[in-house]
Image (tube, rainbow, N blue to C red):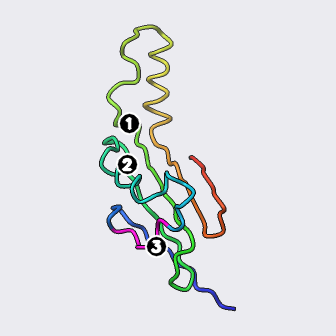
Amino acid sequence: MDATLSFTLFTRADQLPADWDALAEKNIFLSRSYLKVLENAAPENMRCHFIGLFQNNELVGIALSQFLDLSEVESFGDRDSCLKTKVRNVVFKNFSSKGLVHREQYADGTKCVFAF
């Protein structure tokens, strides 16, 4: 059996395939309605991508990736002027400026969440 796998990267919730919610049924955080809210309410430093995994042109997996750029955050605790706060600001600004959160759901019910 020769199965063709492919994926499509969607940048807007209104681009999602009609059968998206069938796979997101047990995970509200991957549902079309949640993704629409997330898309409209996400902070400026967050970029969301919605990923459809297809096998022979049938949607068999869905995923959400959220890229966070912490270097765009205005403040890392300017309310305090202690040495601990200054060290934390340097570390966050220079070493922890980007991150990726990824959630997946497959047709067989398998789920996965990981962050970089």
Which region of the structure is painted magenta? 15-21
Determine which residue is flagged by label 3.
Answer: 19
Q: Secondary structure at mark 2?
A: helix
Determine which residue is flagged by label 2.
Answer: 38
Q: Secondary structure at mark 3?
A: loop
| Relative image position of residue 88 (x, y in whole percent) | 49, 21
| Relative image position of residue 28 (x, y in whole percent) | 50, 52
Q: Secondary structure at mark 1?
A: helix
Decide: is 31 above or below 18: above
| Relative image position of residue 115 (x, y in whole percent) | 57, 47
Decide: is 62 above or below 103: below
Q: Which residue is more in the foreground, 30 or 70? A: 30
Q: Is residue 74 left or right of residue 18?
A: left
In the rendered structure, which amino acid carries the disc numbered 3?
A: Asp
The residues bearing labels 1 and 3 have C-alpha atoms spaced at a distance of: 37 Å
Q: Going by the picture, which residue comes out furthest to the top?
A: 82
Decide: is 114 above or below 93: below
Which numbered disc covers residue 71? 1
> Which residue: 69% across, 91% down?
1
Q: Nearer the viewer, mark 2 or mark 1?
A: 2
Q: Which residue is more in the foreground, 4 or 85? A: 4
- Residue 20 belongs to the span the image colors magenta: yes
The residues bearing labels 2 and 1 have C-alpha atoms spaced at a distance of: 21 Å
Q: Which image quadrant is residue 32 in?
A: bottom left
Mark 2 and mark 1 residues within 8 Å of each other at the beta carbon: no
Q: Nearer the viewer, mark 3 or mark 2?
A: 3
